[in-house]
Image: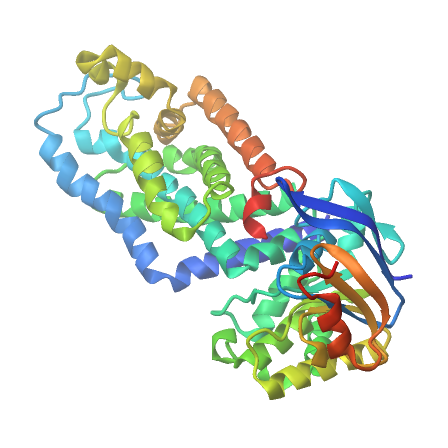
Amino acid sequence: MSAYLTCLGAIVWREGLRFILQRERFFAALVRPLVWLVVFAAGFRAALGLSITPPYQTYITYEVYIIPGLCGMIQLFNGMQSSLSLVYDREMGLMRLLLTSPLPRWWLLLCKLFAGVAVGVLQVYAFLAIAAAFGIVLPWAGYILVLPALVVSGLMLGALGLLLSSTIRQLENFAGVMNFVIFPMFFLSTALYPLWKMAEGSVLLRDVCAVNPFSQAVELIRFALYARLDAAALGWTTLAFVVFLGGALWGYDPARGLIQRKIG
Amino acid sequence: MTLSVDALSFRYGDRVALDDVGFRVERGRFCALLGPNGAGKSTLFALLTRLFVAPSGRIEVAGIDLARTPRAALARIGIVFQQPTLDLDLTVRRNLTYAAALHGLSGRAAAVRIDAALDRLDMGARAGERARDLNGGHRRRMEIARALVHGPDVLLLDEPTVGLDIASRAAITAHVHDLAAEGLTVLWATHLVDEVRPEDALVVLHRGRVVETGAGGRDLSARFSALTRPAAA
């Protein structure tokens, strides 16, 4: 078991070190949601009236509403960034070093996932601290209980990144991921607008948003921030994690996966 | 027998990359896997390191079947890939520590092995330098040291001298011959006949097939040209 933990420690350490060394990435990870919070939310505050829906027990401002969505956004970008780092590792050959380790491949990929989640969770807490400085303070229990929710949502989004990395041939193709994965997932979710508000515009759009795993992750985070459990969101997020991870493990399987075409 | 390959075949779709490849390498031998570009050497290495899995054939490392117990077999292999596989922003020691951890080694045990591996390749003095600051020859030596950290029985090197100047190439070839003399089994893929010594074991691969096995011997250059002529094989 200690060999497994040693390997986990090394991969998390390397991912963390890379994150710290890339200061621009840390800066971008914090500034992106803050721009949404300060600029976008301020603009939409007047346009969007929000009724009292769980987990909120009182009227809330739009800034408060989008906090969980922005936490999810950090994790979404971070998951894709981890995917990018895997593609980078493959181009740099470091992926081979990882995949020829005698530890089981599923564990190696899980280590990569955990490393990404750890980096993502730190970013979310940094964001929540800055949001608190802007006056958006959440219940203290929420700051603690959101941690397991962030781990689950981070794992789901990281597994999606892992799955994508097994299908992306080159670093250059990453722009496509931005256009076809990150933006639709973010905009077609409950991150920026509640489902009932979406239904006023289009019922179909509401349904699409409802089945988007990112919506489920955001709702999981939203309820956890108010010390409540959204069991359905937890279930759907976990299910999406299992499906994405299964696909990623298939993609990295040396016997039949997609990796075969690209590594050689 | 430390490395044994039997009836190994592999295809990329319709294209046959390896066709019924088989050879053996005795313990402590330096075996040159000689073949022109496109002969199938890198595919064979991908199969030996289980990056790919062959649908047919058998690979044994130190008597361990790679297909049946891949983890035990991989633990006995040290690998130097054709493409450099370094984290350029980390120091030499950090790179080796990371590789050791991927084999489950940490703490003092890993540090002792890392020092020993670096000393073996005369890289001890450079342990604190960033990989980015090393020249090509030293980067390669570092990768060889890294492949030795976990104490493998078999060292696989896929064209390790590509891109190096003549002096670095000669030094690395000599270093790895010394490792074989110390008891390590070496499979060294190359397309350069001057890296093969007369006493080395030899496997010539051409168009995915083994066309000669034996010893390096004399006049290898002429033999290799004859074996790999467009009409040959």
Relative to B53, is A238 above or below? above
Towards the viewer: B124 or A232: B124
**Picture quadrant of residue A147:** top left
**Taking A236 as reference, is A263 above or below it?**
below
- In screen coordinates, is B223 left or right of B144? right
Task: Evaluate whether residue B184 shows in this view.
Answer: no
User: Can you say which quadrant of the picture contains the N terminus of chain B?
Assistant: bottom right
Q: Is residue B178 above or below residue A163?
A: below
Q: Quadrant location of residue A256?
A: top right
Residue B88, placed above or below residue A215 = below
Percent across and percent down for residue B154 are 80, 65
Left or right of B212 on screen, residue A108: left
User: Residue A68: x percent and y percent?
Assistant: 31, 33
Q: Is residue A157 left or right of residue B96?
A: left
Residue B61 in the image: state x and y as whole percent: 83, 56
User: Which residue sits furthest bottom?
Assistant: B167
Which quadrant would the C terminus of chain B be assigned to in this image? Answer: bottom right
Colouring mode (rainbow / by chain / secondary structure / one colour): rainbow
Comparing A86 with A263, the one in front is A263
- Considering depth in this image, is B28 or A154 the residue closer to the camera? B28
Q: Quadrant of residue A106?
A: top right
Q: How many marks?
A: 0
For residue B16, say whether it is visible.
Answer: yes
Identify the residue at the far right of this view.
Answer: B1
Question: In the image, B98: left or right of A87?
Answer: right
Work out which residue is located at the far left of the displayed protein and give it.
A46
